Image (cartoon, rainbow, N blue to C red):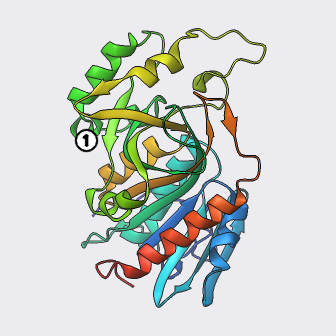
Amino acid sequence: MSLLAEPDLIVNADGSVYHLCMRPENLADTVIVVGDPQRVHEISDHFTGIDHTASNREFISQTGYYKGKRITTLSTGIGTDNCDIVMHELDALANFDLVLRTQKPVHRSLSIIRIGTSGSIQADVPVNSFGLSTHAIGLDNLLHFYKGTPDIIDTELTEAFAAHTTWPKDLSKPYIIKGSDRLIDVFRPYAVAGITATAPGFYGPQGRFLRLPLSDPQMIAKLQGFRHNGHRIVNFEMETSALYGLGALMGHDMVTICALIANRATGHYNPNHKLVVNDLIALVLEKIAAMLNLRK
């Protein structure tokens, strides 16, 4: 196997990967990723023991045990660019010998669950419910940098979306990728399932107008009206397309479930959303503990 150059796979002096500052033995097979670094501690407060903690920039990680299951919880920060870092370094921890700088002969697949906060765009999806991402629409450009992306895209759904929205030619081409059926089925009874739109920004890319005019003021209405073979777009956020896309290319199981703390259609927002996020954390941990097919 080819040896990776040091600038391509940067390993710190202590044997940890560059940004996450984790070593392979720090990584559990089940990983909960969150955007907010503070949420890592809100999750690990439920652990009965912690055997790893690291902090570097927005990337905070802790690995511990919940009802006998070893779990890593890790913050990504905001955006698909950060998720590009996180997914590659998690995969390096799982599937590379960091000393020899070569890929391991046996692939290790991770189960990665994103707990997030998000805003729903459908009037019938109430604030304080949970949104489950069956698919992600990438409105960003990240996945187009990787060979193999056309093989994991739902071409029919993507083309239907582009046609419905008359997608502008000066924006990057959207792509739709499915999450893990196995993990989606675990959480489906507890959430509103649908497509998540992943935007490359919080304001204009999500149809928010403060002072700068929008290039397409009807974009949210177009997303709200999209229907194809029983699918519709439920919410906006900023990470899932990268997680689903890179996870599919790397062979990891991915799912996103978000606390829907706002509704863009009705104008409602819950400023005191900590309780609903805590309920979602408790649900995810209980489901992980109950999944016998998730390895310790």
Q: Position of residue 228 (x, y in %)?
A: 26, 27
Image quadrant holding the N terminus, namely bottom left
Q: Amino acid at mark 1?
A: Ile
| Local crowd size for mark 1, using a 10 Å CA cut-off: few (<14), some (14–19), many (≥20) | some
Q: Is residue 261 left or right of residue 4?
A: right
Residue shown at 38% from the left, 31% from the top: 144
Residue receiving disc 1:
152
Residue shown at 54% from the left, 61% from the top: 33
Q: Is residue 10 left or right of residue 37?
A: left
Q: Position of residue 210 (x, y in %)?
A: 76, 18
Q: Nearer the viewer, residue 99 or 87?
A: 87
Toward which corner of the image does residue 281 lie, by quadrant? bottom right
Dot 1 falls on a residue whose secondary structure is helix
Q: Is residue 25 above or below residue 252?
A: below
Toward which corner of the image does residue 184 lie, by quadrant? bottom left
Q: Nearer the viewer, residue 135 or 224?
A: 224
Q: Is residue 284 left or right of residue 208?
A: left
Residue 101 visible at all: yes
Q: Position of residue 209 (x, y in %)?
A: 70, 17
Q: Is residue 98 left or right of residue 204?
A: left
